[in-house]
Image (cartoon, rainbow, N blue to C red):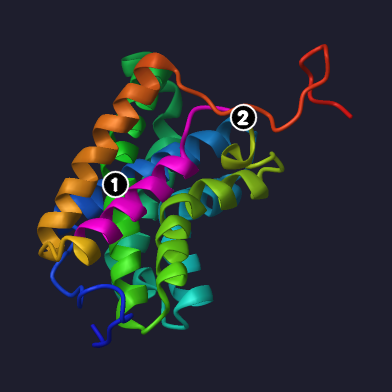
Amino acid sequence: MNGGNTGYLRPMTEFQVPIAFDYVATFTWAVSGAIVAIRRRLDIVGVFVIALLAALGGGLVRDAVFLNRTPVFLVNAVYLTLVVGATVITAVFARYLRNLIGPEAVQKIVDVIDALGTPAFAVYGMQLAGNAGLPLIAVVFVGVANGVACGFLRDLVVREIPTILRPGQFSALAVLAACGLYVLLTGQFAMEPTRAAWITVAAFFVARVLVIRFNWRTRSVWEDESGTGVL
């Protein structure tokens, strides 16, 4: 990685997402995207595109849009291989998988991967942004984008209002809070980056479990008397 410092954070070159978890998360998110595409009756190309965006969209936005570097999945062929594998397996065995473990089990697996992977990849994105010399607010923005862009792109392509823009369980705000916690730990408390990263992951995981358990939700900014939010 390139050196550099934002001037606000300590040099962040130590934290790495464990490679095994990285690959498992990529495959799981690709499967979740493929399931969305299959439910939308897309063909195999459509299933692959949605699986790709669901698994790697965050890194694509981070690298190609914000950091002006070659996306990691184009450098390491394992990522595209995992997405292709998830696409084929889901397309061929979707009906059998649904009967075997059920859609609720699939969603629970995705939720667990989300709760662990989202803050880890957000912190990794912040690390890269910090090393690129971006100011603090941009570092946090890149981290949040790295954490939420996958679902955002997936929803846009299937012509839905992205989940993070609609009232629902806390997601984007939770990622923002996790990024803020990491900045606080590394900046104000001068904590070693890897330790701060894992504390952030653990805090986000606990928060995500509580959000799901108690169904804590955001609300529409404005609602009329009927509660529809229509002006």
- 21 on left or right of 87: left
Residues rendered magenta in the picture: 167-185
Residue 191 seen in the figure: yes
User: Which residue is painted at 24% across and 88% down in the image?
Assistant: 3
Q: Distance from label 2 to label 1 (Cα)?
A: 22 Å
List x then y, in percent, for residue 15: 16, 65
List x then y, in percent, for residue 102: 38, 16
- Looking at this view, is 198 or 92 the one in front? 198
Q: Which residue is mark 1?
A: 117
- Looking at this view, is 176 or 81 the one in front? 176
- Above or below — where is 99 with respect to 14? above
- 2 on left or right of 227: left
Secondary structure mostly seen in the magenta stretch: helix
Q: Is label 1 in a helix, a strand or a loop?
A: helix
Mark 1, residues whose alpha carbon is within 10 Å: few (<14), some, or many (≥20)? many
User: Which residue is painted at 39% across and 25% down in the image?
Assistant: 107
Task: Look at label 2 and name its amino acid.
Answer: Pro
Return the mark for residue 167.
Answer: 2
